Amino acid sequence: MKPLLFSVAFLLAQIPMKLFAQNEANYDESKVPALILPDPFVSEKGFLIKSQDDWEKVRRPEIFDLFESEVYGILPKDFDKISFEVVSEKSNPYPDIAELEEVNIIVTRNGKSHTMRINLFLPKDKKTPTPIVLLINYLPAYPEGKLVDEAFWPVPELIKRGFATASFHAETVAPDLNETFLDGIISTLYPEQIGKANGMKAYGAWGWGAMRAMDYFSQHPKINSEKSVLVGHSRTGKAALWTSANDPRWAITYANESGCGGAAISRRKYGETVEAINTRFPYWFADNFKKYNGKEETLPIDQHMLPGLIAPRAIYYSSAKGDQWADPKGEFLGIKLGSRVYSEIYGKKVEFPDEFESLNSPIHQESVGYHRREGKHDLTWGDWEIFLEFVQKNL
Ligand code: GTR
């Protein structure tokens, strides 16, 4: 139960600052600065990028390097050994429909090892390998042999629809606290990252965890890892996006209400700003990201360039009207503008409406999707239901 106490203490510690930051934030559209955004289609040397080849060989690597050094920090890919151990510690809450695998993933590098845990549910008695949905979770989703929240991680619904589904608690790789985030894989496996301005932080670590889960799926005879869906909400939505930019094995990436440093355009400074997020969560992003506190317009990239790192693989964002802190309009613009790589470079059929305010139905296009719903900041069964319609068309 320690991780749960940790998280509660963490949440309590954040409340006064959170209210302060949210009260100070701009929620007035007329005060949003005119958007002058870096062009995804002009290379650093000034060449116009039109072909897939130029995109993949020139511009995508440039943009990736900038996100890595200036925003998220390095996500190291090397290690010496990985092994998997299936344990049986908790009871299976869905014995009629699913098999449960509790898996320890043991990774060794330079003589040191780290063990992370994933929980995986597989549809019972299925004869063919199944698609997989992985949720990066910031709570221990499955602490006492029952699900904390069946709307947040709808295991039975996913199983009924023919998916295998897994989740891991972000803290199984790096604690979600400024004082202790190094205590997981960063100090054990990648100590050389510590203190570097572009070094690995929590997002690099959580993304690394998702990649190790994928290592497990891709050797599993009951899983079709080519049909894989990566899901994150809010802070883990940001982590999901950075993971997928690093790891092309994910077929569909879904970031729900990922807001500042995720889906939303930073230059809008609407709701949570770069300074607000770096002040409250200094251990999430690379130290370099702090250079842009209050100076978003000097960022060499912005979040509309992130979907292009995932293209042509499918991407999906969603927002909630009551979650103004995450800037729903900035999230919509992030994917609308980001989808240009899908249409202009990869020839996908994507067309986003210009009008955001009057938007009242999901936008489900070829490999790109978005919805906005009523209500507050949360990943709900309603979000999953709409998203799964997109999955059905795009997986
Ligand atoms: C908010 C934070 C966001 C978001 C969220 C969450 O308070 O400001 O950036 O990540 O928390 O993860 O729930």
Image (cartoon, rainbow, N blue to C red):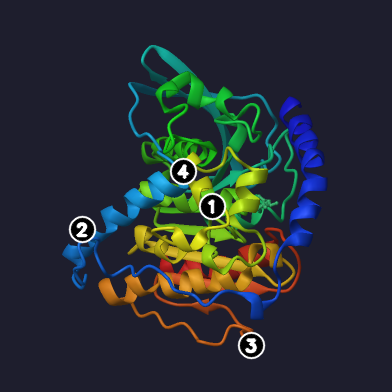
- Residue found 66% across the figure and 28% down from its top: 179
- Front: mark 3 or 4: 4
> Pointer 2 and pointer 4: residues touching (CB < 8 Å)?
no
Tell me the element at label 3.
loop
Tell me the element at label 4.
helix
Return the disc, 2 or 1, that comes first in the chain's sequence: 2
**Residue 393 vs residue 78: left or right?**
right
- Residue found 54% across the figure and 37% down from its top: 202
Name the residue beneath numbered marker 1: 238
**Residue 233 vs residue 309: left or right?**
right
Name the one closer to the observer, 159 or 213.
213
- Front: mark 2 or 1: 2
Name the residue beneath numbered marker 2: 58
Please give the label number shown on residue 358: 3
How crowded pointer 1 is (Cα within 10 Å; few <14, some 14-19, many 20+) is rated as many
- Residue found 28% across the figure and 54% down from its top: 62
Tell me the element at label 1.
helix
* Picture layout, residue 352 above or below residue 258: below
Name the one closer to the observer, 274 or 100.
274
Return the disc, 2 or 4, that comes first in the chain's sequence: 2
Residue type highlighted by circle 2: Val
Rendered-image quadrant of the C terminus: bottom left
Return the disc, 4 or 1, that comes first in the chain's sequence: 1
